[in-house]
Image: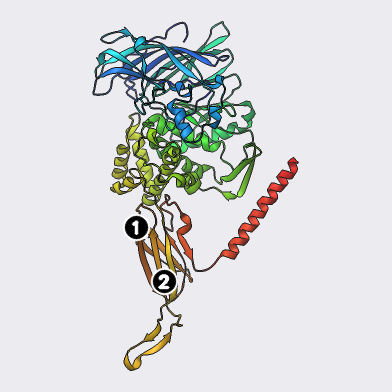
Amino acid sequence: MIARLLAAVALLALAGDGVTDQAPAPPAANAASATPAARSPRNANYAINVRLDPNTRTLTGDQILSWRNVSTASTQTLRFHLYYNAWRNTHSSWMREVQLAGDAADVLDRPESDWAWIDIGSLRLLSGAAPADLTSRLRFIAPDDGNTNDRTIVEAPLDSPVAPGETILVQIAWSSRVPRTNSHQFHSATEFFSDFGTYDVKVTVPRGWIVGATGRERGRVDGGDGATTHHYYAEDVHDFAWTTSPRFLERIETFQHATLPPVAMRLLLQPEHESQAERHFKATRAALKYYGEWFGAYPYEHITIVDPAWRSGAGGMEYPTLFTAGTRWLAPRGVNQPEGVTIHEAGHQWWYGVVATNEFEDAWMDEGINTFATARTIAQEFEPNYLSKRYFGGFIPWVFRDVPLSRATDGNRLAGYRRVARSDTASTPTWRYWPGSAGAITYNKTALWLHTLERMLGWDTLQRILSTYYSRWAFKHPRPDDFFAIVNEVSGHDLAWFFDQVYRSSNAFDYGVDTFQSVPEAARGLVGDGADRKFSSGDDRSVYRTTVVARRYGEGVFPVDVRVVFSNDEEVRWRWDGQERWKTFDVVKPVRASYVQVDPDRVLLLDLNYTNNSASLAPHARRAARKWSLAWMIWLQDHLLTYGFFI
């Protein structure tokens, strides 16, 4: 999901985050070569000590980074992400983009205590050709948008370049204030991208506070000063996150499956949500099961589910082996909250966590694929899923049990895509999207075109595409063309024409019925010649000519079927390549046509307007009016009864 941070989360990349009185021991200089079983290059490895002061919401930390240059070029500078500076003031790039999207009203009114910062106290190069204190060389840069007020990227020039294959050790001391939650800069429409490595982290918090973090806990030490240090360790991950609270309820269960490895599930739950523990576990099991069966097994032995505090703004976020869900005190059955967000965030462990695409540039490769897979998982395990609205300030839920939500439209978020379909080209780097359209293009459009591929190629083929992609590119940071090549390879089709439209253009799709008529074939007027010429009234109804004009209203081109059903339930189908702006189809039969459909099987789920996809010669207005009148009367009665209860 779009980046939101826990109240006490440290995000560490080649980006100083994350101090105790004693510096951490340096990590292995080359963890990949030291560990033959390593799944990833492990070229960015961290040893971190961090201490939380809950009274001031500050973190102080000291860390040693072992970084190996795995590129083919030397580098003369080091760059670090300082994410918390996104919430330093309203001039940061993150804040500017949120304001452009119209989502900043509640942020701009926050008091002084809600704003955040992160400062590097010292930066020292411990090894390499020229060890040096780099602190005085630090400078903020804005390589994306030139915003000189943004402080989310800091750079330090080196005396000597780091050659390809060379490893250096860097020590960083830092301090930060955690925002009250609300090598690119940090942008509102993007998340995180880092190298894989190992994280050896010691987190010091008040005694009795529960800690959840990326990786496994290796031990705890009571400091004798009212604080406890928790030691966490993780391998083959590209980020680290942790959370702590004195209120968490801890629950532990195990995912078991006949063909997939077991996974220890740890749930950190708010006390008021204790009754929903099994719903969180069931949703996590569903993600581990279906994603595992469809795409490939979850590679870690543990996963932590965090239920964030109400109105913390920290729900719906993913980190390696840990994610935040999101629920409410009143969570009725038949509505997928918390199930939907839990499945989605657990599912990120595959595309964000393992495949690890660059979300600054190509967020759709995680968010979009995951939105598609989430909707498919919900359809397998959690239907019916009903429409629900919240009233009285969003507190009281009302479930409309006569309005089930569908995977094709609601699960793939068609409504949101419709509003911004032409706003951005998906191949645009994600950080350059218009902030108001980024989510719908990244999540919704991708889910829609993947589901379209499923209906066009068949699920068996698409499943093999995604499982091949997952297994081949695990721990390797693929790019879009890598994904498209696998689609073509596994499907056996050159689908460049499809990706040229859904990825490389902002073309919108809209096919519909322009004209539909079914009239007697007998001609009215003069028929015959010479002495046989006579007038015909055209009343002979033994034969009917049915004519359909199908039209392409949008710029997008896609092959569609045109289907006509006759009064005797017989049907005729034509295949149209969809190239022309319009095409006529006609047929002569002894019966009159009843209705026509363009794309009757709804293969093209990117179609922006389904209301023009069909037409009928048999009016149904009276039946429709009766159906919806009764439905609205029931809804109104229910609302009046509810209102009457409270007054």
Q: Can residue 313 be seen at all in this image of the molecule?
A: no
Q: Can residue 620 be seen at all in this image of the molecule?
A: yes
Q: Where residue 62 sits in the image (x, y, percent)?
A: 43, 11
Q: Secondary structure at mark 1?
A: loop
Q: Where residue 226 sits in the image (x, y, percent)?
A: 58, 8
Q: Is residue 303 above or below residue 505?
A: above
The residue under label 2 is which amino acid type?
Thr
Question: In whole angstroms, how far apart are the C-alphas of marks 2 and 1?
Answer: 20 Å
Q: Is residue 56 above or below residue 391?
A: above
**Quadrant assignment for the C terminus:** top right
Looking at the rendered structure, which numbered label has been put on residue 546?
A: 2
Question: What residue lies at 42% left-to-right and 41% top-to-bottom?
Answer: 441
Q: Where residue 344 sits in the image (x, y, percent)?
A: 48, 36
Q: How is the image coloured?
A: rainbow
> Looking at the image, do the residues carrying marks 2 and 1 touch, with CB atoms under 8 Å apart?
no
The residue under label 1 is which amino acid type?
Gly
Looking at the rendered structure, which numbered label has been put on residue 212?
A: none
Mark 2 vs mark 1: which is more N-terminal? 2
Which residue has dot 1 on it? 578
